[in-house]
Image (cartoon, rainbow, N blue to C red):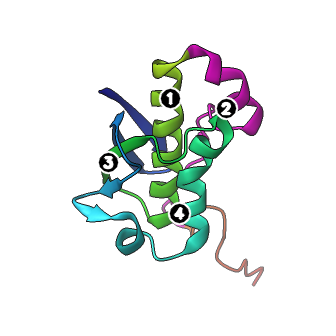
Amino acid sequence: MYNTSGRRKAAVARVYLKEGKGEIIINKRGLETYFPLPWHRTSIHSPFAVTGNEGKFDVTVNVRGGGISGQAEAIRLGIAKALVDLNEEFKPALRQAGFMTRDSRVVERKKSGQKKARKRFQFSKR
């Protein structure tokens, strides 16, 4: 069993990878029920597709924080890191596809005296 973590925005995913039939369980629920949108599921399956390991591993994930998209990207990073732990030869292909880099962009904090992080209240000259 290989376990890694992946992060994206405010989401943190703990990924456990073991040989099996290709089942993906997220927070004790199936992939289709946790991620109803198809592009989220495609994003999670993409590290397996790049390395040619579709249907060979069971994945169990505990994910917390953030929204659905951030969680899907965090899981994708965690799976990619676990596959590299399994076989170092997968790393160039996963890096070429952009799955090994943690996307560090996070939401900017709201400043006091402003409407949002960057939006100001309207300036009144008089």
Alpha carbon of mark 4 to alpha carbon of mark 2: how far? 17 Å
In the rendered view, tell whether residue 125 sits above or below residue 44: below
Secondary structure under badge 2? helix
Name the residue beneath numbered marker 3: 61
In the rendered view, tell whether residue 72 sits above or below residue 57: below
Of the numbered discs in the image, which one, if any, rests on residue 83?
Answer: 1
Q: Say which label, 4 or 1, has the lower sequence index.
A: 4
Q: Say which label, 4 or 2, has the lower sequence index.
A: 4
Of the numbered discs in the image, which one, if any, rests on residue 94?
Answer: 2
Secondary structure under badge 3? strand
In the rendered view, tell whether residue 17 sits above or below residue 111: above
Q: Say which label, 1 or 3, has the lower sequence index.
A: 3
Q: Say which label, 4 or 3, has the lower sequence index.
A: 4
Residue 87 placed where, x, y %? 53, 18
The kind of residue on which mark 1 rests is: Leu
Of the numbered discs in the image, which one, if any, rests on residue 41?
Answer: 4
Nearer the camera: disc 1 or disc 3: 1
Alpha carbon of mark 1 to alpha carbon of mark 3: how far? 14 Å
Residue 5 placed where, x, y %? 39, 34
Residue 107 in view (yes/no): no
Q: What residue range appears in magenta? A: 88-113
Secondary structure under badge 4? helix
